[in-house]
Structures are given as C-alpha cells and as structure tokens.
Amino acid sequence: MKRLALFAVILAGVLFAATASEFPRLGDPDSAPSRHLSPAYIHGSKPQTATPNFVTAVLADYRGFDTMFETAVVFLAGMSCFFILRVLRRRGIAEVYYYRHRPTGVVLAMLTPRRISPRSSCFERIDADWTPQDMVVETMCLFMVPFIQVFALYVIAHGHYSPGGGFQGGVLLAASFILVGLSRDLRTVESLLTEKTAILAAAAGVCLYAGTGLLALFFGGNFLDYGAFGPFFGAAVPAARSMGILIVEIGVALTVMATLVTIYKLLSSRGTVEEGL
Amino acid sequence: MHELLTEFANKFHYYGYFAIMMIGLYAMIAKTNLLKKCIGLGIFQTAIMLFYVSIGAKEGAGIPILDPAVGTADPAAYANPLPQVLMLTAIVVSVATLGVALALVQNIHRDHGTIEEDEILKGLRGK
Amino acid sequence: MILEIKIAMLVLVMVCAVASITIKDLLGAAVVFGTYSFMMCLLWTSMAAVDVAFTEATIGAGISTVLMIAAVFRTTRRTKD
C-alpha cells in the first residue's frame, strides 16, 4: 500500500512539475494575475475607502461578501465541535471529584461535587492529573495576559494602516484566554468566559457583519455597500466606507475569538469542560 | 542548455512547492495514524497557499500598504494584494477544519480505543 | 530578498515537513508542525505578504499547535507507524 501510494504521489508530482513551464517566472511584475483587477484596487483603495492597507480594503470592502461567509464558516466549525464533542457526563466512568486541603496537602476524593466559595482558603478543587503548580510560571503568564489583550485590540483598530485586522486580533484575544487556561486550569477560563457567553458572542459577530449589510439596504444602497451610510451621518463616502470596514472587522474578531476559545475548551477536556490540560 | 538553466532558475520555487504538496498528499494517503493524516492535510493546504501567494510577488516590490512617498502611480511597486486576501481566508478556514477533524479523532478514540486506521478496521470487521 | 536565503528557507520547510510526518512520538510531530508554520511565515515575509505572514504566525504556530497538543494528550502519544 505504501509503495503504491509513493508511486502515485511521485507520478502526480512529475505531472505537476511538467506544467511549471506555463507559469509566470519568479517575481514577474506583469504576470496575468497582476494585470486587470489588482491595479484598480491599488489605485482606488485610498481615494474610495480611505484605507492605505490594500489587503484590508479588498478583504472587507471590495470582497466583503466572501469574508461574511468565511465568518459564518468559522462559526459553523465551532458549532460542529460543540455538537460532536460535548457530553454532560462521561459514559461508563464514575465521576470522582478531588479536593485538596491547602495547609496540609491532604487530598480527598468524593463522588458528588461540593460547592466551595472562591475565597475559602482551606480546600481547593484540583484535576485528576494535578501536579504542584510553579508560582513563577503562573504569575508571569497571568501578568502578560492584559498586555496581549491590549495589543490585540490595537491590531484590530489599526488594521487600516498596518498589517492586521479582524482575524489576527481575534486570534490574539483567543490566545490570551488559552494562556490563562494553560497556566491556571480550565475552570478559570470557564468562569471568565462561560460557554453560553462565548456562543452568544460568536453569533453576535456574524449578526454584526450581516446586520451592517442589511442596514446599508435600508439606507438605500446595495447589500454591504457602506457608502450608503455617508449622507445620513454627515460624512463623506470614503470616511463612511472606512467606518464600515472597522465595524465588520470588529464583528469578525468577536466571532473568531469566541469560536477558538470554545474549540480549545472542548478539545482539551474531551468534551466535559471540567478538567483541562 | 543555457536556456534550460535560466528556465530552472526562474521556476525552481514551483518545484519546491509541488514537492511539499506531494509530501502532504503522501502523508494523507499512506500513514495509518489519524493524527498524521491531519498533519498531512495541514501541510498540503499551506503548500497550496505558498503557490498562490508566490504568483502575486513582484521583484523589488514593497508590502501592499500605501507608501505616501511612492504613491499609486506605478502598481509594480506594491505586491499584488488579491492572492493575499484569498489566502487569508484559506488560513482561517484551515484552522476551523482542523478543529473539527481533531474533535472527530477524539470521538473515534473514545469509541474504539485506538487511532490507528488498520486496528480500527480490524476491530470493525471482527465484530 | 536575497536568493540564497529563499532557497535555504525552502529547503528547511521541506525538512520540517518530512520530519513532522516521520517522527513516531506524536507530541514531537505536533511541535515540528509548529516549526513548519513558523518557517512558512518567514517565507511569506520574504514575498512581501505581511498580512498572510501575521495570520499564519498567530493561527498556524499558535492555535493550531495548541489544538494538536491538546488532541495528543487526550488520545495516545506513541504511534507505531
């Protein structure tokens, strides 16, 4: 089977390589993809949308329809993970809950969960594979989290002028939550961003994007034509389009953050969202 | 001979991208571990993105952000933004797909106890 | 960018790809996949595609590696293949 696969793969590779003579040479400025549409985007981006970053202008304004459905695909992937993995109780395994007495280090195993107030200093709930936490690592990771989040918000807001935008900022926000989950435990992340809030935030991001498009319809323009907002708010059309790009990037960032945190929570706990990595 | 060498020097990166693509395809077909198949899927996807974005690269061009000193008179001064936009979408979709694939792998491990394809098939045929 | 650097990065990308599908320890394979993503990000920066490089660095080398390590910890770690 492996020999056959190797032979087929080498044959396909040779066939692909034989077509390389048709492709443009390395770094050709006049290749076929650079001829008709992309000079129009490069010339028209600053005057029409007030966005110096051509990639953000094309992503959120000229090709905004694609990006809306891509946001919907990300939301759909989060929902699929939820429906595939989420179990309320692990099948066939008796649930045991471990509580550790902080002053002495004694661990109790119980069959029913007990409610512990967060400020109580006697008992804490631990995972089944708990090891003594290193205070230095935990403190430094938690210290870095606000800086990561501020940088993520900067990347979202500055996407018009520098590399960045909604996707990168949303992923950075999700990474800050995953850092909390890795340095503390999954229950801290669950208390910071509950499952219900995350799924509602993901849906809100998609609705924000589609809602902006529908609002443009009500104001008399086409679907996702941000220039139609201009006359009603007293702004020129390029400024209105720039503001429209910012609003949809915020929607995209919200959806991407909520979906990635949901997927991490479900994958690292085998669906129970009780004990993580 | 000389034109064969210049042809190779102009197009060598395409051979590299096809080689990476074939490594990913081989991993998806021949490996029996499900996680190795997911890794092969990721390699295949990023090789295709490399191929796409490399068509939009121009020699001596800067990043596709407007530089006030250069202006928009000459589009050959900026890299082509259109393939980059399409591949941005592709990267985000690839991580969403990877999340769903890993969720399915965990379910298979829960039901069959193993993630090797031949052992799963043997267990299914034995029952 | 200089041609020799581009050739070196392309060779390193191929080495990382072959290594990540050959290593029998799945945790090592996931980590080498993260390295592959980082080299891919460098390749795109050399082609002046900075938005794509930013996205690949955060998503590929950040989130994708973490998700794969989570999956490895919750299934098996060694593979015989």
Image (cartoon, helix red, strand yellow):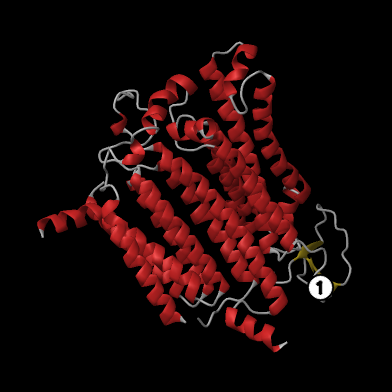
The quadrant where residue B9 appears? bottom left
Q: Residues within 10 Å of mark 1 (few under 14, many from 20)?
A: few
Name the spot of residue A21 as percent of width and height, x first: 26, 54
Left or right placement of residue A35 versus residue A173 in this view: left
Residue at the far bottom: name it.
B126
Q: What percent of the width, then of the height, locates residue A189?
A: 70, 52
Residue drawn at the location 64% of the way across and 81% of the way down: B120
Q: What chain does badge 1 belong to?
A: A
Question: Eyeballing the image, is A235 above or below A215?
Answer: above
- Can residue A277 be spotted in the picture? no
The image quadrant of residue A121 is bottom right
B11 or C8, nearer to the observer:
B11
Asked whether residue B64 is in view, the answer is yes
Q: Which residue lies at the image location 49% right of the left edge and 78% below the top edge?
A: C24
Which is nearer the eye, A197 or A184?
A197
Q: Secondary structure at mark 1?
A: loop
- What x and y, as percent, mark residue B29? 49, 72
Residue A58, given in percent of the width and then of the height, sits at 48, 33
Vertical relation: C21 (above or below) A38: below
Query: How many marks on residues?
Result: 1
Which residue is denoted by mark 1 in the rendering? Answer: A91
Given the image, on which type of amino acid does mark 1 rest? Arg
Residue at the image position 30 percent from the left and 61 percent from the top: A17
